């Protein structure tokens, strides 16, 4: 009798979870027909030359993270969540990218960044160099440097920018401008003696010296720019935030010094300064808002630190001043950090903020001349399941207990990580803890201090000129080649010598026919 009542209750609850309109088959048919009409319109390809390129990179934003972020976004809007759309979901073309490094089945963020920025797969832990470079070995670097799509865009006279929620010398942004046998050589203070004696440069120095005319650089990482023990402007009493450089260089001053006479270079470290900026009067912008990585979006100080969306808005307005267009790299870098710490709530809110930046950029640009791509470098061993009912809070419990240890469990779990906890010789009872807290570490199957990356393919969303080139399953290093082709930059430009690709030819046909008739 008890089992019957529980079953009946579950059925009644399940029925109430279904929105009334979804009970009508016609709702689903009409939705499918609308989607079909949208798909048929895609037969008219956008073959314009991409004046602008924006690459959004969700570090660690695997497909399970995308899905969970979609649900979270909807629930933050007081909806059930599953039916919601992320901004990236609205992009018409979707592909999968294979993320492995040349020497790793499950990759790291440095080798992958080299792939999707430089167009060449590389070894884990190395940035901006080929697979001929061995991690940590400075003497293998010379002659193995590879350039990025940011460099290709700059060489064609476009404005370029980097926006990240990590330090600006971290793996993802550094592959855009640096060449290093070790992704962790943020300043010379992190480099071994043999690398320094071998002539290798730290990544912060390369940021200033390799491509000195990057128009916009926004993120964290102040301490790598200043001499060792220099007090931080925001946290003067905290030793861990002091400068790390051994060479005594002030790289912010060096950044200023590299700018041409008559050009205005502005350095900011406070949100107020950034938002008050008159972009029409600034040619180069460097914003470093934290000594290391920027603070998680949920914990961000709204007075001192800008959001990713705010940084992107300023960056686009800065870059749009160039009549030849721009390339912008935008990284939601702390999705990855949240997952590594087992803090799914932090990771998913970072993903929602990245998606907010995608939407903002879409409103500031046009798909007629701007190719936008959203992707990830790799996934994580993050999952959610447990037969949760429709609208279940994404950070909530599964509607069942384990049939082995008779304890509840959260829908979100990790394959490994710091959330592995044994209490009294048994799995921790999550009902006894605040599993909805921002810093709650979701339970993991295997104990590790840091959760690991996942090895499955990641999604690639594309919209704008030649976005249809991103389709099917690709090697990750294909991405910058497709984007460069769309913008007529980089090595593959033979197709650019014609009027402007088939779209332009079609526009000229009526004129040519008229001329023939007149003859």
Image: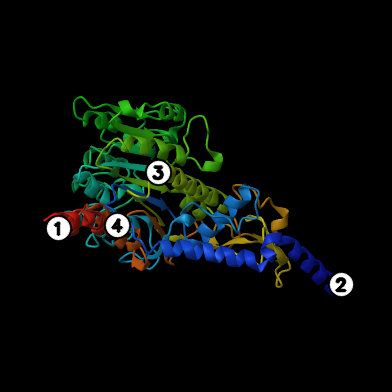
Residue 37 x/y as whole percent: 48, 63
Q: Which of the two residues, 181 or 62, is positioned nearer the viewer here?
A: 62
SS of the residue under disc 2 = helix
Residue sticking out furthest to the right: 1
Asked whether, in this view, residue 237 is left or right of residue 180, the answer is right
Secondary structure under badge 4? Answer: loop
Q: Is residue 259 above or below residue 146?
A: above
Label 1 vs 4, first from the N-terminus: 4
Name the residue tied to disc 4. 47
Determine whether the residue tagged by mark 1 lies in a helix, strand or loop.
helix
Horizontal and vertical percent position of residue 97: 38, 64
* Nearest to the observer: residue 494 or residue 316: 494
Circle 4 Cα neighbour tier, 10 Å, few/some/many (<14 / 14–19 / ≥20): some
* Label whose residue precedes the other's in the sequence (3 or 4): 4
Q: Quadrant of residue 236?
A: top left
User: What residue sits right under mark 1 in the picture?
Assistant: 516
Q: Residue at x 62, y 47 (%)?
A: 77
For this orientation, the residue located farthest to the front is: 518
Query: What is the quadrant of residue 142 in the picture?
Result: bottom left
Q: CA distance from mark 1 to mark 4?
A: 27 Å
Q: Nearer the viewer, mark 1 or mark 2?
A: 1
- The residue labelled by disc 2 is 2
The residue that disc 3 covers is 164
Query: Looking at the figure, which quarter contains the C terminus?
Result: bottom left
Q: Pick whichever of labels 2 and 3 is earlier in the sequence.
A: 2
Using a 10 Å C-alpha cutoff, classify the residue at mark 2 as few (fewer than 14 neighbours), some (14 to 19) or many (20 or more).
few
């Amino acid at each position: 009798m008890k089992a019957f009542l529980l079953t009946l209750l579950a059925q009644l609850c399940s029925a109430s979870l279904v929105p009334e309109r979804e009970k009508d088959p016609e709702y689903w048919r009409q939705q499918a027909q609308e989607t079909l009409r949208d798909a048929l319109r895609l037969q008219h390809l956008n073959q314009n030359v991409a004046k602008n390129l924006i690459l959004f990179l969700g570090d660690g934003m695997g497909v399970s993270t995308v899905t969970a972020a979609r649900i979270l976004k909807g629930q933050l809007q007081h909806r059930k969540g599953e039916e919601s759309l992320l901004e990236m979901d609205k992009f018409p073309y979707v592909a999968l990218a294979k993320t492995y490094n040349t020497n790793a089945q499950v990759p790291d963020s440095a080798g992958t960044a080299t792939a999707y920025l430089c167009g060449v797969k590389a070894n884990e832990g190395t940035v901006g160099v080929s697979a001929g470079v061995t991690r940590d070995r400075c003497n293998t670097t010379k002659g193995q440097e590879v350039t990025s799509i940011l460099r290709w865009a700059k060489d064609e006279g476009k404005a370029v920018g980097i926006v990240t929620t990590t330090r600006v010398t971290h793996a993802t942004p550094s592959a855009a401008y640096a060449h290093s046998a070790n992704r962790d050589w943020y300043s010379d203070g992190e480099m071994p003696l043999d690398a320094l004696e071998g002539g290798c440069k730290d990544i912060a120095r390369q940021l200033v010296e390799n491509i000195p005319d990057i128009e916009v650089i926004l993120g964290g990482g102040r301490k790598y720019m200043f001499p060792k023990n220099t007090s931080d402007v925001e946290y003067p009493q905290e030793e861990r935030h002091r400068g790390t450089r051994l060479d005594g260089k002030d790289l912010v001053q060096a950044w200023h010094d590299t700018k041409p006479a008559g050009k205005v270079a502005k350095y900011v470290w406070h949100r107020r300064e950034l938002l008050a900026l008159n972009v029409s009067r600034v040619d180069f912008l460097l914003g470093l808002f934290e000594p290391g990585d920027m603070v998680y979006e949920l914990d961000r100080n709204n007075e001192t630190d800008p959001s990713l969306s705010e940084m992107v808005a300023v960056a686009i307005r800065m870059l749009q001043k160039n009549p030849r267009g721009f390339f912008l790299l935008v990284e939601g870098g702390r999705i990855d950090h949240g997952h590594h710490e087992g803090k799914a709530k932090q990771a998913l809110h970072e993903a929602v903020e990245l998606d907010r930046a995608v939407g903002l950029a879409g409103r500031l640009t046009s798909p007629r001349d701007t190719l936008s791509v959203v992707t990830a470098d790799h996934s994580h061993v993050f999952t959610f399941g447990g037969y949760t009912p429709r609208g279940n809070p994404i950070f909530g419990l599964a509607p069942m207990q384990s049939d082995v240890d008779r304890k509840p469990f959260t829908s979100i779990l990790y394959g490994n990580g710091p959330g592995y906890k044994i209490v009294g010789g048994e799995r921790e009872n999550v009902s006894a803890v605040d599993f909805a807290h921002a810093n709650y570490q979701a339970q993991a199957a295997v104990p590790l201090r840091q959760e690991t990356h996942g090895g499955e393919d990641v999604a690639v969303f594309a919209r704008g000129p030649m976005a249809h080139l991103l389709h099917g399953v690709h090697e990750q290093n294909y991405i910058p080649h497709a984007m460069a082709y769309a913008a007529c930059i980089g090595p593959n430009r033979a197709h650019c010598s014609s009027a402007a690709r088939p779209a332009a030819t079609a526009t000229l046909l009526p004129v040519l026919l008229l001329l023939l008739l007149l003859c």
